[in-house]
Image (spheres, grey):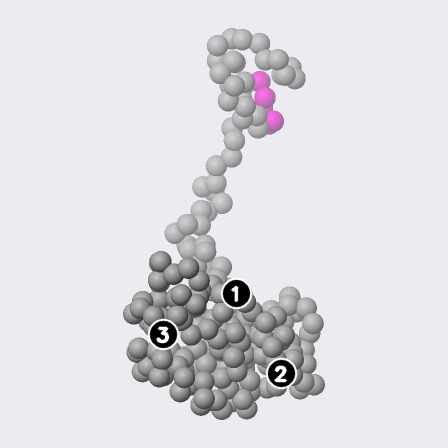
């Protein structure tokens, strides 16, 4: 999606924001409106792109739903498609696009609130990343940007909640078989053969 934004808008400037929902340009589906904000450094270089995405209650489909199961393509679906369309310039809304959305979408006030929330979230990300030291590699940016460090910790905590973490003493280790002390052999077939008194064909004990 960032590549689409750069392709359609080669001259990115601080204060720009773009609305994107085209499934043919990297988005999940048309009902997921995405706000893209380029992070521009003091030299005018495009360093990062902040994404904020939210599923919408309505997107102007031919039917009052965002999931038209019998639609053959986006034309049959009838949704408003925004391929990285600019919605802010110099941090100001472009009213033509806003009017188009409010007129076509069945719940304009709800969409407007979601749109403002997306813009606000993306601008916070832009502000945090703009405060990072200008490094080219993402790893350096993570270490220099407190917001990215907090996000990384929060993601780790969600994926590994305390209830799912096992203390070191509770971790199970394979028990060595008789005659294999210290080797940690866990071959179940070998275990059964030893119990039945049959010889082991592998390395002698």
Q: Which residues are magenta?
A: 179-183
Q: State the residue position of label 2.
A: 12
Name the residue located 64 percent from the left edge and 68 percent from the top edge.
138
Vertical arrangement, residue 34 with respect to residue 194, above or below? below
> Which residue has dot 1 on it?
24
Q: Is residue 90 magenta?
A: no
Q: Residue 147: horizontal and vertical position, in percent? A: 53, 73
Closer to the N terminus: mark 1 or mark 2?
A: 2
Alpha-carbon span between mark 1 and mark 2 = 22 Å
| 12 left or right, relative to 83 | right
Mark 2 or mark 3, earlier in chain = 2
Identify which residue, 16 or 163, lies in the foreground: 16
Decide whether the magenta segment is chiefly helix, strand or loop.
loop
Left/right of residue 44 with respect to residue 196 in the rendered view: right
Per the image, label 1 sits on a secondary structure element best described as helix
Rendered location of residue 115, percent (x, y): 41, 80
Quarter containing the N terminus: bottom right
Q: Nearer the viewer, residue 39 or 93?
A: 93
Q: Position of residue 40 (x, y in %)?
A: 62, 82
**In the figure, is residue 83 to the left or right of 78?**
right
Q: Earlier in the sequence, mark 3 or mark 1?
A: 1
Q: Residue at x 59, y 13 (%)?
A: 200
**Crowd rating for badge 1 (residues with CA inside 10 Å; few <14, some 14–19, many 20+):** few
Name the front one of labels 2 and 3. 3
Instruction: Name the residue beneath numbered marker 3.
Output: 60
Quarter of the image where the C terminus is located: top right
Q: Is residue 38 visible?
A: yes
- The circle on residue 178 is none
């Amino acid at each position: 999606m960032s590549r689409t934004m750069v392709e359609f808008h080669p001259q990115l400037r601080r204060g720009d924001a773009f609305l994107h929902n085209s499934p043919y340009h990297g988005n999940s589906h048309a009902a997921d409106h995405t706000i893209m904000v380029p992070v521009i450094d003091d030299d005018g270089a495009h360093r990062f792109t902040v994404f904020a995405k939210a599923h919408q209650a309505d997107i102007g489909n031919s039917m009052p739903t965002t999931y038209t199961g019998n639609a053959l393509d986006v034309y049959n679906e009838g949704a408003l498609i925004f391929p990285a369309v600019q919605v802010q310039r110099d941090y100001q809304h472009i009213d033509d696009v806003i009017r188009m959305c409010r007129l076509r979408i069945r719940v304009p006030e709800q969409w407007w609130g979601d749109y403002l929330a997306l813009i606000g979230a993306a601008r916070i990300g832009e502000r945090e990343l703009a405060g990072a030291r200008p490094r080219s590699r993402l790893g350096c940016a993570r270490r220099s940007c407190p917001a990215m460090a907090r996000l990384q910790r929060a993601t780790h905590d969600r994926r590994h909640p305390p209830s799912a973490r096992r203390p070191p003493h509770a971790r199970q280790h394979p028990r060595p078989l008789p005659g294999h002390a210290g080797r940690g052999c866990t071959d179940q077939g070998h275990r059964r053969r030893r119990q039945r008194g049959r010889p082991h064909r592998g390395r002698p004990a």
